Amino acid sequence: MSKTDGTNLRVVLYEGPGSEPFDGDARADALAALLDNGFEVTRPALGGEVADADDSPVLVLGRFDAETAPADRDRVAFRDVTDRSADDVVALARDARDETGARALDAWKPWFPVIDYDRCTNCMQCLTFCLFDVYGVDADKQIQVQNESNCKTDCPACSRVCPEVAILFPKYKKGPINGDVVRAEDVQREAMKVDISALLGGDLYGSLRNRQREARERFSTERDESRALLERKRCLTKLQKDLDIPNEVLMSLPSTEAIEERAARAKAKLARRQSESQSVKDRDAPAPGPTEDDWGI
Amino acid sequence: MTDTRPRILYCNCTYARVVPPSVKRDVLRRLSDSGVAFDAVPDLCDMAARKDPALARIAASPCTRIAACYPRAVRWLFHAAGHPLPDDGVDVSNMREQTADEVVERLLADTAPAGEAR
């Protein structure tokens, strides 16, 4: 099961008719413990609104009269928590989660890009930059995040190459990438970072490949291993610093060969599409639009 | 008749340490003691990544108060989940920047504490 599949168990702290209210500490401790362990909690109250029920399984916890919880029904379970500690409450929730088949939490850090469509110009920089297939396009060729769980935790590099500061990582440490207001100076600063691509000749990956080839040639001609390695390290350090790429992400980047293979596949797709378009034109019929696959490399 | 009772949502930002723990703890405790109804979720980012249908119900409310992080992030997280928040009637308090007092004041403004639970 993927980290983003499944339904959560919803826990309801019930204090209505047929039960005694929790005392302040017990309620607050249970709430905090449940949330810290990944459970959604609803605290209903007379005259107040909470989210409606849906298909998610529900666990109702209360200090029921005579310490007897009502019988379970459908996807709703009832448990008495009179004199139970916060740890006991979490244990009951875990049991209910297992019994109902609700999603077991991996305690993953939900790290993925979120697009601010008020700013996005659909330039596709993020799609071409990301090597982990996080981005794709919808039927209207609008950029969208399609594979959230492919994103590398703590790597905000795609937001760094976005010329419009339109990509957020809500759990990032600094603004505006964390969702803080975008100021004119932010746009200017991010644009300067984007220039790294231009500085490297407009094609970041192409430039990296060239540098690698040059370094290899230099190594073979000069026989100066340490100098070549130092140059390579210097380039990678600069790139890593400018884009705030974590070490683990650099380590997991596809190999040069894999990148070249992707590029070749994309080129072949494009050629095929052009060829198909030409054939259709030849038949005097409308040309087919690109498929979603055509945009992925 | 349109229901304008505010629906309160608290995000615990469980999976990251970007919200000051003291602010989170204080806001949650005071919500818990307030006697008002509310929903609390471990992490809105996680729900958005899963396109959780519960976000649709929250987004559908004509009057929603959310305690989470930056309003721009919250807005586009709901959008990413396929359940955009309405343009009006949503108030987002930012626990990364605001004090617990400020957040609680906005969450509980004009909400009468419940006389008894239902």
Image (cartoon, helix red, strand yellow):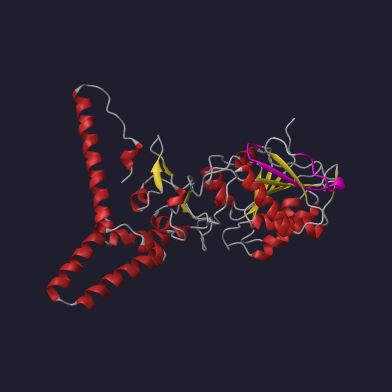
- Disc tally is 0
Q: Where is residue B61 in the image (x, y as percent from the top left)?
A: 67, 39
Q: Residue at x 24, y 56 (%)?
A: A257
* Residue at x 43%, y 56% (from the top left corner): A159
Residue A223 appears left or right of A262: left
Q: Using the image as rendered, state which of residue A85 and residue A243 is in the foreground.
A: A85
Position of residue B70 measured from the top left corner of the image (x, y, whole percent)? 58, 55
Query: Which image quarter: residue A239?
Result: bottom left
Relative to residue A56, is residue A206 drawn left or right? left
Q: In which quarter of the image is residue A144?
A: top left
Is A182 located above or below residue A144 in the figure? Answer: below
Residue at image position (85%, 42%) is A17
Q: Is residue A63 magenta?
A: yes
Identify which residue, A58 or B15, lies in the foreground. Answer: A58
x then y, percent, for residue A56: 63, 40
What x and y, as percent, mark residue A27? 77, 55
Q: Can residue A210 be seen in this view?
A: yes
**Residue B96 belongs to magenta span:** no
Vertically, is A218 above or below A263?
A: below
From the viewer's perspective, tell me whether residue A136 is left or right of residue B89: left
* Residue B28 in sight from this viewpoint: no
Q: What stretch is highlighted in magenta?
A: A54-71
Residue A44, quarter of the rendered image: top right
